[in-house]
Image (cartoon, grey):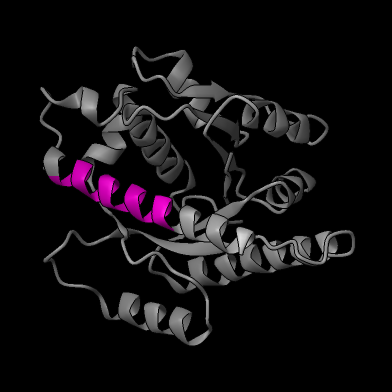
């Protein structure tokens, strides 16, 4: 089953938000889903341990360099999707998680700093790919950049974001066509320790638009994973 690593050496790029929103959405659609919280701050483990969400998503915390590979393999045997929320630094734990991934999401905000850090994540993915090809010449680690904290659909897009999108395209780096917009509801998921679907009665901005954003992004992820699987079988 797909192992999806969410990586960027820069903290605050939206890794945990992306991971939790996608995983809980897929779980709400009936998929067996697990999150391995490998962030030292344990934001998703805290969301699960101290909240009252009824989401079926499983959360595994306290991943370490010496246990991460076993944890990934164990959860992949029993879950349709395994997400690994990685720490915001370059480390052996990050490298091993990327090496075991079937796909890597690299969240970035529309800033030059984020793009430079995202390039480090891409370099890490390609390095692990090269190492893997020494034993398996056909091994690849597909990856895409995800723009986060973007303006809501219909709102003006900054010149910086447009420039960064063009730089990503010109560099031949894959990018999600959907972005993850800046939404009050996404922050509330962590503060209330609930899923988007469970916050229906709360006033947290345009909840319907937030849910639709995640639905479209999840659909694009599923389409990407299906294409990867078909390519591997070809």
Is 215 included in the stretch rendered in magenta?
yes
Q: Residue reaching furthest front?
A: 234
Would residue 49 appear left or right of 136 to someone viewing this image?
left
Query: What residue is shown at x 47% (from left), y 87% (from top)?
Result: 170
Q: Position of residue 158 (x, y in %)?
A: 25, 75
Which of these two is toward me, 209 or 115? 209
Query: What residue is shown at x 34% (from left), y 67% (from top)?
Result: 177
The part of the chain drawn in magenta is: 209-223
Is 163 included in the stretch rendered in magenta?
no
Which of these two is toward me, 105 or 138? 138
Principal secondary structure, stretch drawn in magenta: helix
Q: Is residue 208 above or below residue 64?
A: below
Q: Is residue 107 above or below residue 46?
A: below
Query: What residue is shown at x 16% (from left), y 62% (from top)?
Result: 153
Q: Residue reaching furthest bottom?
A: 170
Is residue 205 visible from the viewing direction of this image?
no
């Amino acid at each position: 089953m797909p192992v999806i690593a969410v990586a960027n050496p820069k903290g605050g790029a939206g890794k945990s938000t992306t991971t939790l929103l996608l995983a809980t959405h897929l779980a709400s659609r009936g998929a067996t889903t697990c999150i391995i919280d490998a962030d030292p701050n344990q934001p998703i483990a805290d969301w699960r341990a101290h909240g009252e969400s009824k989401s079926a998503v499983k959360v595994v915390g306290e991943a370490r360099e010496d246990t991460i590979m076993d944890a990934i393999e164990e959860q992949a045997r029993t879950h349709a999707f395994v997400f690994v929320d990685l720490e915001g630094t370059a480390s052996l734990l990050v490298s091993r998680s990327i090496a075991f991934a079937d796909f890597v999401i690299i969240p970035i905000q529309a800033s030059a700093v984020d793009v430079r850090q995202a390039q480090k994540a891409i370099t890490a993915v390609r390095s692990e790919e090269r190492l893997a090809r020494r034993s398996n010449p056909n091994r690849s680690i597909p990856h895409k950049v995800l723009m986060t904290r973007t303006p809501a659909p219909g709102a003006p897009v900054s010149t910086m974001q447009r420039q960064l999108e063009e730089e990503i395209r010109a560099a031949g780096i894959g990018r999600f066509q959907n972005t993850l917009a800046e939404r009050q509801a996404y922050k509330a998921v962590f503060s209330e320790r609930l899923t988007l679907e469970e916050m229906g009665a709360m006033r947290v901005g345009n909840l319907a638009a937030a849910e639709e954003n995640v639905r479209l992004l999840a659909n694009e992820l599923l389409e990407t994973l299906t294409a990867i699987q078909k390519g591997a079988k070809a």
